[in-house]
Image: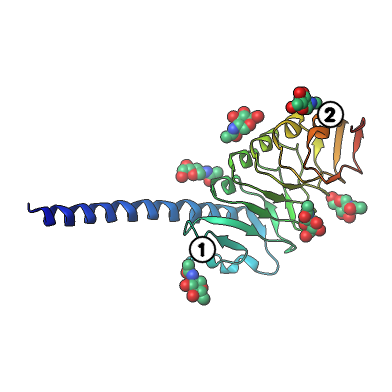
């Protein structure tokens, strides 16, 4: 082989590797979105009817935004106020580049998936005004970039995990109001120096915040 042949071979090989990597990325986020759609059992306005392979690339599906820097990686999912019913599929946790999840004012029941704890880039999670039950998952304490956490107006029970106040140091808004939370408000919440909005009313919580 001449050196230009070698160069050509190298370029060919590296472009094959790159497209293999790209194909895997497409598959991961694509599959995660399809699995999310699977969890949606009612969609009265047909918002997710664009979510199929006939209507183009998944980055163009209703409510989906993708990264400019990392093509084909989902950065935001915004399906607010659509009256969607069903459960929130844990497959969302495979959207590893996601920063924003907005699913408020829908009819999702089931639990807040603990798998959300894998989303290290997550900055904003709004699941308010649904019918979610179960606990506030302690795993959310792994989402150390979280600035906004709104789980208000659901049917969540159990206590507020102490860990949230220990690791979510960037938290600016924490809304857990209008649930069925019990126990003592963790004093670690008082340590969150960026916190400007804290809604805990309409629960059965005890204690003070200092
Ligand atoms: C999304 O749709 C627009 C306009 O319909 C099109 O120009 C663009 O190429 C599509 N993007 C992808 C990633 O398919
Ligand atoms: C996430 O992706 C992995 C590997 O791609 C897959 O095995 C797993 O089932 C997916 N998890 C969910 C909850 O979809
Ligand atoms: C969450 O979404 C609801 C409905 O759009 C909105 O009223 C609320 O302000 C949002 N929460 C935060 C913290 O932005
Ligand atoms: C997240 O947090 C839980 C509980 O604190 C922990 O067990 C788990 O290993 C952490 N990591 C992930 C990726 O969820
Ligand atoms: C409390 O949450 C329920 C849904 O769980 C909702 O119907 C109700 O309007 C909420 N109340 C307030 C005052 O936000
Ligand atoms: C608050 O933060 C300080 C300094 O990081 C730490 O020593 C203390 O244990 C924290 N308090 C709580 C209740 O987490």
Residue 1 placement, left or right of 90: left
The answer to whether residue 144 shows anywhere in this view is yes
From the image, tell me which residue sits under label 2: 187
The answer to whether residue 55 shows anywhere in this view is no
Label 2 CB sits under 8 Å from any ligand 6 atom: yes
Which residue is painted at 68% across and 44% down in the image?
Answer: 146
Residue 165 placement, left or right of 27: right
SS at circle 1: helix
- For ligand 3, the image quadrant comes to bottom right
Vertical placement of residue 7 versus 172, above or below: below
Which residue is painted at 69% across and 50% down in the image?
Answer: 124
Q: Nearer the viewer, residue 206 or 43?
A: 206
Question: Are there few (<14), some (14-19), or many (20+) residues within 10 Å of tag 2?
Answer: some
From the image, tell me which residue sits under label 1: 58
Q: Nearer the viewer, mark 2 or mark 1?
A: 2
| Disc nearer the start of the sequence (2/1) | 1
Q: Position of residue 128 (x, y in %)?
A: 78, 52
């Amino acid at each position: 082989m001449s050196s230009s042949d070698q160069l050509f071979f190298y370029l060919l090989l590296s472009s094959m590797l790159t497209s293999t990597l790209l194909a895997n990325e497409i598959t991961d986020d694509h599959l995660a979105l399809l699995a999310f759609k699977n969890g949606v059992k009612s969609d009265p306005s047909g918002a997710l009817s664009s979510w199929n392979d006939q209507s183009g690339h998944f980055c163009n599906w209703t409510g989906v935004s993708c990264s400019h820097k990392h093509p084909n990686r989902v950065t935001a999912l915004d399906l607010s106020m659509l009256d969607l019913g069903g459960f929130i599929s844990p497959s969302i946790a495979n959207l590893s580049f996601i920063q924003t999840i907005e699913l408020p004012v829908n009819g999702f029941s089931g639990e807040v998936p603990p798998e959300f704890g894998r989303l290290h880039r997550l900055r904003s999670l709004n699941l308010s005004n649904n019918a979610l039950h179960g606990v506030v998952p302690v795993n959310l304490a792994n989402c150390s970039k979280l600035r906004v956490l709104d789980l208000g107006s659901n049917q969540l029970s159990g206590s507020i995990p102490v860990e949230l106040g220990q690791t979510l140091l960037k938290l600016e808004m924490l809304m857990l109001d209008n649930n069925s939370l019990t126990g003592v408000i963790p004093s670690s919440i008082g340590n969150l120096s960026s916190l400007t909005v804290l809604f805990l009313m309409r629960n059965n919580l005890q204690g003070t915040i200092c």
